[in-house]
Image: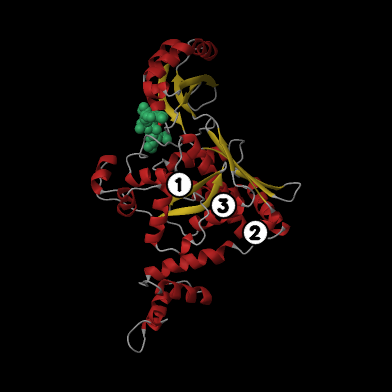
Amino acid sequence: MDKSSRLPGFYKLSLEERVALVGEWAGLTEEERAVLERGLGPAQADRMIENVVGTCALPLGIAVNFLINGRDYLIPMAIEEPSVVAGASYAAKLVRQGGGFVAESTEPLMIGQVQVLGVADLKRAAQAVLEAREDIFALADAQHPTIVRLGGGAKGLEVRELTDTPVGPMLVLHLLYDTRDAMGANAVNTACEAVAPLIERLTGGRVVLRILSNLADRRLARARCAIPASALEGEEVVRGIVEAWALAAVDPYRAATHNKGIMNGIDAVAIATGNDWRAIEAGAHAYAARDGRYTSLTTWEEDAQGNLVGRIELPLAVGIVGGATRVHPTARVALKILGVRSARELAEVMAAVGLAQNLAALRALATEGIQRGHMRLHARQVAIAAGAKGELVDRVAEQMVAEGRIREARAREILRELDVGRDGIPPYSKE
Ligand code: NAD
């Protein structure tokens, strides 16, 4: 079977046809295909969080066309916002023309923080902690033999002296911990808790916090793409995209929206795969402000050959085991569709999706204006809210867009007008 993710006309298929195609592409069993329809059941949900009364579903779409490090991917995206899946697929198609995305990642190193107060001599205490490095690692590693066996566990130790805080001086220990294919919050927190008594003995102080940092800046993912100007309909578009990005580079008001667009893609993959998107959001935005001024997570430039070159770098603490990744049935199927073999590969794919999403938004903003395409989809939602079904959804939406009036009341009016066929049959069904 052709394993290209370039699936022309995928959007024109019916939902059933899409499930069949993706099912065949990814080798899904009948049961896994059924999961796409059924989703998370109430009994499973009841075991996941507290006080459960039901579930709250989101649409799951598939972004096509992604070529990353020479491999084709179909990208499951769970999101309620129209245009995101289409935008990612469109941008990935452009990027294919430049050879696809090149992505890489660091080792999956998380930072666990241990906060120590009441230390008499910060310098001496810091020295004592660093000298006991091997003992601290042994204690941390004893908590998670599986992760250690897989090559993870404690890998580094740093001590920071914070002298100017609202409660006086404190010492903060950073335990660098390789979580392998897990997001790792629980593993890191357990390791921090385990080393705390030893840290108190070594420093003579009192440990308060023992928890991971979501500013996972030792666990970065990067992606790069180069798109020929011809694919973008000329150098003017290339220049327009670079100019649009430039505002995000210098202005936090624009950067917040620019990065929100990036996170549209990254969060959608995180949610589809059962990952903790709040952790990813926290890390991404803290990283965007790492130099003291909040800025863009991407860069765009024109290279010497006139190609548009984009880059993204951000922390991506994601897992393919642990958390909800294997508990949520849809997440399990989404991971199978994606076919990633490690947490690092998932992070690399997500970085590429973020870059694609950013390209789609910038291209639209720099050229036709994002509103036109978006309004068409927004109008469909309004039409559905007004009660339109089947082909009437598009009929009502098109008319509202043409009139420039996208309101539920107007949709109801149009529905009434369209519905008055002489024989009582709505006009659309006669075509
Ligand atoms: P987890 O607790 O389920 O741990 C993963 C387990 O998988 C490990 O104990 C390990 O033994 C096992 N494992 C099997 N194969 C592995 C492999 N190849 N690589 C690594 N581990 C392997 O999951 P977690 O990732 O520690 O925790 C993630 C959850 O923690 C998320 O759901 C998140 O919402 C939550 N959380 C987040 C925060 C935060 O971000 N601030 C804080 C607390 C909890």
Q: Residue at x 64, y 59 (%)?
A: 366
Q: Give, as a three-letter code, the residue at label 1.
A: Val
Residue denoted by label 1 = 269
Residue denoted by label 2 = 366
Expressed as whole percent of the image width and height from the top left, the position of residue 321 reads: 38, 35
Mark earlier in primary sequence (1, 3): 3
Expressed as whole percent of the image width and height from the top left, the position of residue 249 reads: 65, 46
Farthest residue to the right: give it.
304
Report whether residue 257 is seen. no
Residue denoted by label 3 = 92
Q: Give, as a three-letter code, the residue at label 2.
A: Ala
Expressed as whole percent of the image width and height from the top left, the position of residue 348 reads: 53, 39
Q: Is mark 2 within 8 Å of ligand 1?
A: no
Q: Residue at x 61, y 40 (%)?
A: 293
Name the element at disc 1: helix
Mark 3 or mark 2: which is in front?
Answer: 3
Name the element at disc 2: helix
Q: Residue at x 41, y 20 (%)?
A: 207
Nearer to me, 184 or 290 = 184
Vertical order, 120 against 3 (above or below)? above
Vertical order, 194 against 97 (above or below)? above
- For the residues labelled 2 and 1, the Cα–Cα distance comes to 26 Å
Q: Residues within 10 Å of mark 1 (few under 14, many from 20)?
A: many
Q: Residues within 10 Å of mark 2 (few under 14, many from 20)?
A: many
Mark 1–mark 3 contact, CB under 8 Å? no
Q: Quadrant of the C terminus?
A: bottom left
